[in-house]
Amino acid sequence: MQSNNLGSVERLRVSALTVPTDAAESDGTFEWTSTTMVLVEASGGGCVGYGWSYTHTAAAMLVDELLAPLVVGQPIADVAAAWSRMAAALRNLGRSGLGTYALSAVDVALWDLKARALALPLVGLLGRCADAVDAYGSGGFTSYTVGRLGDQLAGWAADGLSAVKMKVGREPEADIARVAVARDAIGPDVGLYVDANGAYDVAQAAGLADAFAEHGVSWFEEPVSSDDLDGLAHLRRRVPPGMAVAAGEYGDGPAYFRRMLAAGAVDVVQADATRCGGVTGFLRAAAVADAAGVPLSAHTAPTLHAPLCCAVPGARDVEWFHDHVRLERLVFEGTLEPIGGRLVPDMERVGLGVELKTSDADKYVTWASA
């Protein structure tokens, strides 16, 4: 079937699903007890494509009221044109933040719909660079007891993940001891990452980097705010050899990543398709990183990001994030599971390879379009 004969987008259905966490969670700067997924179902040509973002219910309303009318009736094949119309419509509302999160969910759904209409897996439509991508376990919340911290990270290590990540920054005076617990739990051969979510100042982060290095920490994520490019660049020059500085999860477009890389702020760029403009935005972020010769790491949403990382050069890994793994398993059938520490897109399933478990998902719906 030719891509220009796929038909038109007939409907966008949008809903917000709020799922309680399995325990109270916190990082260096935020606390939460639930996670909200904004889910978009794009219908057309006898197919349904799924897209999602992790954000506020307000993004679902924005999709329904503003973005859906711009997409419905348009050719399924023309995802780039739909992206441009949506971005233009968000200009005066503020495209960054909530606007881009809303656009992201729609864009992912449109790419999924296009791949399904062509009877292709999404990674096949995009073109594979790799058959699989490494995954690293991510959780280790600051709200966890040291016992739960150790058990969670050790579980991922036992499952074959080659690296794990924990949160730091809420109680800086306790962080060195918590990192030591993590290292003891996972043993000497598994990579250990820390994520401060911007909780430290530059001086704190510099001192703690040295202490973390003694426990083999090789990744320091957002040691200071991602908005502090000078601070990140200073720390990148200052941290011990073998420790990478990573940031970028809040990036909303190519210009954001270009500024970050021009400042020499990171060793690893983190991009998130649920925040940076969907599949279209992720591909653009990957191109910027590739042009700069800097590795790309996908932030959270592993079932979405695995095929994208397999379709771009320079993709380093995908974050196997506890909350999103749990939520995606609850609402979708066909979510990916690590095999030998890697995520392998299923080439026998079309699109993203997932199907909505409607009766299960409906339990968590807090808002839905008519």
Image: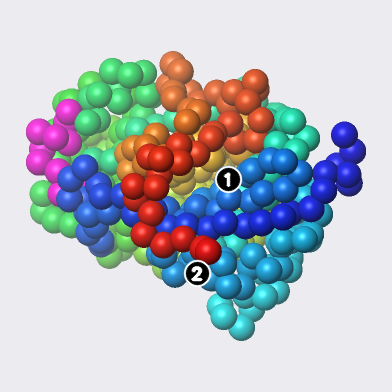
Q: Which residue is mark 1?
A: 50
| SS assignment at label 2 | helix
Viewer-proximal residue, 314 or 277?
A: 277
Q: What residue do we see at 38% from left, 24% from top?
A: 162
Q: Quadrant of the N terminus?
A: top right
Q: What residue do we see at 44% from left, 49% from top?
A: 246
Task: Locate residue 257, reporting x and y percent.
Answer: 58, 59
Q: Which sits earlier in the primary sequence, circle 1 or circle 2?
A: 1
Residue 354 belongs to the span the image colors magenta:
no
Q: Amino acid at mark 2?
A: Met
Q: CA distance from mark 1 to mark 2?
A: 17 Å
Image position of 318 with respect to 55: above or below: above
Q: Is residue 138 left or right of residue 16?
A: left
Q: What residue do we see at 65% from left, 35% from top?
A: 351
Q: Is residue 294 left or right of residue 324?
A: right
| SS assignment at label 1 | strand
Q: What residue do we see at 34% from left, 50% from top?
A: 364
The color scheme shown is: rainbow
Please provide the residue range marked out in magenta. 141-151
Q: Which mark is residue 61?
A: 2
Residue 150 belongs to the span the image colors magenta:
yes
